[in-house]
Image (tube, rainbow, N blue to C red):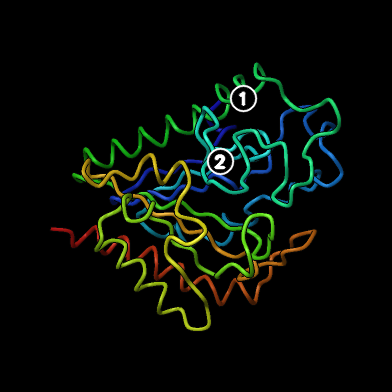
Amino acid sequence: MSAELYDFRPARCPVLVSIPHAGTMLPPGFAARLTDAAAGLPDTDWHLPQLYDFLAEMPVGLIRARVSRFVVDLNRAPDDTPLYAGATTGLCPDTLFDGEPVYRDGMAPDAAEVAARVETWWKPYHAKLREELDRIRATFGFAVLFDAHSIRGDIPRLFEGRLPDFNLGTNRGAAAAPDLVAAAESALSAACGYTRITDGRFVGGYITRTYGRPADNLHALQLEMAQSTYMEETPPFAWNDLRAGLLRPHLVRLISALVDWSANRP
Protein backbone atom coordinates (compact mmCIF):
# COMPACT_ATOMS: atom_id res chain seq x y z
CA MET A 1 0.00 0.00 0.00
CA SER A 2 2.85 2.43 0.80
CA ALA A 3 3.99 2.36 -2.85
CA GLU A 4 0.62 3.85 -3.78
CA LEU A 5 0.91 6.61 -1.19
CA TYR A 6 4.41 7.94 -1.71
CA ASP A 7 7.81 7.37 -3.30
CA PHE A 8 10.60 6.89 -0.81
CA ARG A 9 14.38 6.62 -0.90
CA PRO A 10 16.31 6.40 2.39
CA ALA A 11 19.00 8.93 3.18
CA ARG A 12 22.71 8.11 3.19
CA CYS A 13 23.52 11.41 4.90
CA PRO A 14 21.64 13.54 7.45
CA VAL A 15 19.47 15.32 4.83
CA LEU A 16 15.93 14.28 3.86
CA VAL A 17 13.89 16.04 1.14
CA SER A 18 10.10 16.06 1.33
CA ILE A 19 7.85 16.91 -1.65
CA PRO A 20 4.27 16.81 -0.33
CA HIS A 21 2.34 18.77 -2.98
CA ALA A 22 3.45 17.44 -6.37
CA GLY A 23 1.07 14.46 -6.42
CA THR A 24 -1.82 14.24 -8.88
CA MET A 25 -3.39 10.92 -7.90
CA LEU A 26 -7.12 11.03 -7.14
CA PRO A 27 -9.24 8.24 -5.63
CA PRO A 28 -11.88 6.62 -7.87
CA GLY A 29 -14.83 8.93 -8.47
CA PHE A 30 -13.07 11.97 -7.00
CA ALA A 31 -12.56 13.85 -10.27
CA ALA A 32 -16.32 13.86 -10.99
CA ARG A 33 -16.88 15.90 -7.82
CA LEU A 34 -14.56 18.73 -8.86
CA THR A 35 -15.65 21.98 -10.45
CA ASP A 36 -14.37 22.85 -13.90
CA ALA A 37 -11.96 25.30 -12.30
CA ALA A 38 -10.51 22.61 -10.04
CA ALA A 39 -10.47 19.76 -12.55
CA GLY A 40 -6.98 20.62 -13.80
CA LEU A 41 -5.59 20.57 -10.22
CA PRO A 42 -4.27 24.13 -10.61
CA ASP A 43 -2.72 24.48 -7.13
CA THR A 44 -0.38 21.52 -7.59
CA ASP A 45 3.38 22.00 -7.09
CA TRP A 46 3.89 21.06 -10.72
CA HIS A 47 6.96 19.19 -12.02
CA LEU A 48 8.97 19.32 -8.79
CA PRO A 49 10.11 15.67 -9.03
CA GLN A 50 11.49 16.45 -12.50
CA LEU A 51 13.09 19.67 -11.32
CA TYR A 52 14.74 17.92 -8.37
CA ASP A 53 15.72 14.79 -10.31
CA PHE A 54 19.37 15.49 -9.50
CA LEU A 55 18.67 14.27 -5.96
CA ALA A 56 19.02 10.70 -7.25
CA GLU A 57 22.76 11.36 -7.65
CA MET A 58 23.13 12.70 -4.11
CA PRO A 59 23.18 10.92 -0.74
CA VAL A 60 20.05 12.73 0.49
CA GLY A 61 16.82 10.87 1.21
CA LEU A 62 13.53 11.59 -0.52
CA ILE A 63 9.85 11.19 0.29
CA ARG A 64 7.38 12.34 -2.36
CA ALA A 65 3.60 12.14 -2.07
CA ARG A 66 1.57 10.65 -4.91
CA VAL A 67 -1.86 11.81 -3.76
CA SER A 68 -3.12 15.25 -4.80
CA ARG A 69 -3.32 17.99 -2.20
CA PHE A 70 -6.99 18.31 -3.21
CA VAL A 71 -7.60 14.97 -1.50
CA VAL A 72 -5.70 15.90 1.65
CA ASP A 73 -3.02 18.51 2.23
CA LEU A 74 -0.02 16.86 3.86
CA ASN A 75 1.37 20.25 4.89
CA ARG A 76 -1.60 21.11 7.09
CA ALA A 77 -2.37 20.05 10.66
CA PRO A 78 -4.59 16.97 10.98
CA ASP A 79 -7.06 19.03 13.03
CA ASP A 80 -7.11 21.68 10.26
CA THR A 81 -5.67 24.46 12.42
CA PRO A 82 -5.10 27.39 10.01
CA LEU A 83 -1.47 28.06 9.07
CA TYR A 84 -1.82 31.80 8.56
CA ALA A 85 -4.07 34.55 9.86
CA GLY A 86 -4.98 35.66 6.34
CA ALA A 87 -6.38 33.72 3.41
CA THR A 88 -5.14 30.14 3.15
CA THR A 89 -6.39 26.68 2.23
CA GLY A 90 -7.20 23.85 4.59
CA LEU A 91 -6.58 20.19 5.27
CA CYS A 92 -9.10 19.08 2.65
CA PRO A 93 -9.37 22.32 0.71
CA ASP A 94 -12.78 23.43 -0.51
CA THR A 95 -11.49 26.53 -2.28
CA LEU A 96 -8.69 27.09 -4.78
CA PHE A 97 -5.92 29.56 -4.07
CA ASP A 98 -7.90 32.19 -5.98
CA GLY A 99 -11.06 31.53 -3.93
CA GLU A 100 -13.00 29.53 -6.51
CA PRO A 101 -14.82 26.43 -5.17
CA VAL A 102 -13.14 23.03 -5.46
CA TYR A 103 -16.32 20.94 -5.34
CA ARG A 104 -19.56 20.93 -7.23
CA ASP A 105 -22.62 21.80 -5.18
CA GLY A 106 -23.30 19.26 -2.47
CA MET A 107 -20.14 17.24 -3.15
CA ALA A 108 -17.73 18.60 -0.52
CA PRO A 109 -16.56 16.04 2.06
CA ASP A 110 -18.26 15.79 5.43
CA ALA A 111 -16.37 15.35 8.72
CA ALA A 112 -16.38 11.56 8.46
CA GLU A 113 -14.86 11.64 4.98
CA VAL A 114 -12.20 14.12 6.06
CA ALA A 115 -11.28 11.84 8.97
CA ALA A 116 -11.05 8.87 6.60
CA ARG A 117 -8.74 10.79 4.26
CA VAL A 118 -6.48 11.62 7.18
CA GLU A 119 -6.29 7.94 8.11
CA THR A 120 -5.73 6.76 4.55
CA TRP A 121 -3.34 9.38 3.17
CA TRP A 122 -2.11 11.86 5.77
CA LYS A 123 -1.07 9.57 8.61
CA PRO A 124 1.02 7.11 6.55
CA TYR A 125 3.02 9.93 4.94
CA HIS A 126 3.82 11.53 8.26
CA ALA A 127 4.53 8.19 9.90
CA LYS A 128 7.15 7.48 7.24
CA LEU A 129 8.52 11.01 7.50
CA ARG A 130 8.92 10.69 11.27
CA GLU A 131 10.37 7.20 10.97
CA GLU A 132 13.06 8.31 8.53
CA LEU A 133 13.93 11.44 10.52
CA ASP A 134 14.27 9.32 13.66
CA ARG A 135 16.47 6.84 11.81
CA ILE A 136 18.67 9.62 10.41
CA ARG A 137 19.01 11.22 13.85
CA ALA A 138 19.86 7.88 15.44
CA THR A 139 22.52 7.26 12.77
CA PHE A 140 24.11 10.69 12.51
CA GLY A 141 23.08 12.42 15.73
CA PHE A 142 20.85 14.96 13.96
CA ALA A 143 18.65 15.32 10.89
CA VAL A 144 17.95 18.05 8.33
CA LEU A 145 14.58 18.18 6.56
CA PHE A 146 14.17 20.20 3.37
CA ASP A 147 10.53 20.70 2.35
CA ALA A 148 10.23 21.55 -1.35
CA HIS A 149 7.32 23.57 -2.75
CA SER A 150 6.33 25.84 -5.62
CA ILE A 151 3.42 28.17 -6.31
CA ARG A 152 2.20 30.67 -8.87
CA GLY A 153 3.93 33.98 -8.35
CA ASP A 154 0.81 36.11 -8.62
CA ILE A 155 -2.17 35.16 -6.40
CA PRO A 156 -3.80 38.36 -5.07
CA ARG A 157 -6.00 36.46 -2.61
CA LEU A 158 -2.93 35.05 -0.84
CA PHE A 159 -0.39 37.85 -1.13
CA GLU A 160 0.07 41.31 -2.57
CA GLY A 161 2.26 41.93 -5.57
CA ARG A 162 4.62 39.45 -7.15
CA LEU A 163 6.11 36.70 -4.99
CA PRO A 164 9.92 36.55 -4.84
CA ASP A 165 11.48 33.68 -6.78
CA PHE A 166 12.90 31.99 -3.67
CA ASN A 167 10.94 32.05 -0.41
CA LEU A 168 12.91 30.37 2.35
CA GLY A 169 10.87 29.47 5.43
CA THR A 170 12.39 28.74 8.84
CA ASN A 171 9.36 29.34 11.10
CA ARG A 172 10.94 32.72 11.85
CA GLY A 173 14.20 31.11 12.91
CA ALA A 174 12.65 28.51 15.22
CA ALA A 175 12.94 25.50 12.88
CA ALA A 176 16.67 25.37 12.11
CA ALA A 177 20.07 26.32 13.49
CA PRO A 178 21.11 29.88 12.53
CA ASP A 179 24.25 28.72 10.70
CA LEU A 180 22.20 26.22 8.67
CA VAL A 181 19.81 29.00 7.67
CA ALA A 182 22.80 31.19 6.80
CA ALA A 183 24.24 28.42 4.60
CA ALA A 184 20.95 28.12 2.73
CA GLU A 185 20.67 31.90 2.33
CA SER A 186 24.21 32.12 1.03
CA ALA A 187 23.52 29.44 -1.57
CA LEU A 188 20.39 31.23 -2.75
CA SER A 189 22.02 34.66 -2.76
CA ALA A 190 24.53 33.38 -5.31
CA ALA A 191 21.70 32.90 -7.82
CA CYS A 192 22.10 36.08 -9.87
CA GLY A 193 18.93 37.37 -11.47
CA TYR A 194 16.60 35.73 -8.96
CA THR A 195 14.83 37.45 -6.09
CA ARG A 196 14.66 35.93 -2.61
CA ILE A 197 13.37 36.44 0.91
CA THR A 198 13.52 34.57 4.22
CA ASP A 199 10.36 34.19 6.31
CA GLY A 200 8.27 36.48 4.16
CA ARG A 201 4.76 35.45 3.15
CA PHE A 202 5.72 31.79 3.61
CA VAL A 203 7.52 30.94 6.84
CA GLY A 204 7.01 27.19 6.57
CA GLY A 205 3.93 25.03 6.80
CA TYR A 206 2.93 22.26 9.17
CA ILE A 207 5.88 20.09 8.16
CA THR A 208 8.51 22.75 8.83
CA ARG A 209 6.86 23.94 12.04
CA THR A 210 6.32 20.44 13.42
CA TYR A 211 9.59 18.70 12.55
CA GLY A 212 11.92 21.67 12.89
CA ARG A 213 13.09 21.35 16.50
CA PRO A 214 16.78 22.28 16.73
CA ALA A 215 16.85 21.57 20.48
CA ASP A 216 16.00 17.96 19.59
CA ASN A 217 18.61 17.83 16.80
CA LEU A 218 15.94 18.12 14.11
CA HIS A 219 16.28 21.01 11.65
CA ALA A 220 13.77 21.94 8.96
CA LEU A 221 13.68 24.43 6.08
CA GLN A 222 11.00 25.10 3.49
CA LEU A 223 11.61 26.51 0.03
CA GLU A 224 8.58 27.92 -1.76
CA MET A 225 9.55 28.86 -5.31
CA ALA A 226 7.68 30.98 -7.83
CA GLN A 227 6.70 28.58 -10.59
CA SER A 228 7.64 31.07 -13.28
CA THR A 229 11.28 30.16 -12.56
CA TYR A 230 10.89 26.81 -14.33
CA MET A 231 7.45 26.45 -15.97
CA GLU A 232 4.41 28.25 -17.35
CA GLU A 233 2.04 29.40 -14.63
CA THR A 234 -1.11 29.14 -16.76
CA PRO A 235 -2.87 25.94 -17.92
CA PRO A 236 -1.73 23.43 -18.99
CA PHE A 237 1.18 24.37 -16.68
CA ALA A 238 3.87 23.30 -19.10
CA TRP A 239 7.46 22.60 -18.15
CA ASN A 240 9.95 25.11 -19.58
CA ASP A 241 13.28 23.49 -20.48
CA LEU A 242 15.19 26.76 -20.71
CA ARG A 243 14.02 28.19 -17.39
CA ALA A 244 14.42 24.88 -15.59
CA GLY A 245 17.89 24.42 -16.99
CA LEU A 246 18.92 27.82 -15.66
CA LEU A 247 17.33 27.22 -12.26
CA ARG A 248 18.47 23.68 -11.50
CA PRO A 249 22.17 24.48 -10.82
CA HIS A 250 21.08 26.85 -8.06
CA LEU A 251 18.99 24.13 -6.45
CA VAL A 252 21.93 21.75 -6.70
CA ARG A 253 24.06 24.35 -4.90
CA LEU A 254 21.39 24.78 -2.22
CA ILE A 255 21.01 21.08 -1.45
CA SER A 256 24.78 20.68 -1.58
CA ALA A 257 25.07 23.46 1.00
CA LEU A 258 22.79 21.53 3.35
CA VAL A 259 24.82 18.36 2.83
CA ASP A 260 28.09 20.26 3.41
CA TRP A 261 26.72 21.85 6.58
CA SER A 262 25.76 18.41 7.81
CA ALA A 263 29.22 17.00 7.04
CA ASN A 264 31.02 19.85 8.78
CA ARG A 265 28.74 20.31 11.76
CA PRO A 266 30.66 20.24 15.05
Q: Looking at the image, is 44 positioned above or below residue 3? A: below
Q: Which is closer to the viewer, label 1 or label 2?
A: 1
Instruction: Give me the disc on residue 236.
Output: none
Q: Residue at x 68, y 43 (%)?
A: 24
Q: Amino acid at mark 1?
A: Arg
What residue is disc 2 on?
65
Q: Amino acid at mark 2?
A: Ala
Of 126 and 10, which appears nearest the observer? 126
Q: Is residue 232 left or right of residue 115?
A: right
Badge 2: residue crowd in 10 Å (few <14, some 14–19, many ≥20): many
Q: Residue at x 33, y 52 (%)?
A: 15
Q: Is residue 78 left or right of residue 181?
A: right
Q: Is residue 255 left or right of residue 160?
A: left
Q: Give the residue furthest to the bottom.
A: 192
Mark toward the start of the polypeptide (1 vs 2): 2
What residue is disc 1 on?
117
Q: Is residue 35 left or right of residue 163?
A: right
C-alpha span from label 1 to label 2? 14 Å
Residue 12: where, in percent of width, then height? 31, 49
Residue 62: where, in percent of width, then height? 44, 47
Residue 222: where, in percent of width, then height? 44, 54
**Secondary element at image label 1:** helix
Dot 1 and dot 2 residues touching (CB under 8 Å): no
Residue 216: where, in percent of width, then height? 22, 40
Badge 1: residue crowd in 10 Å (few <14, some 14–19, many ≥20): some
Q: Residue at x 35, y 55 (%)?
A: 59
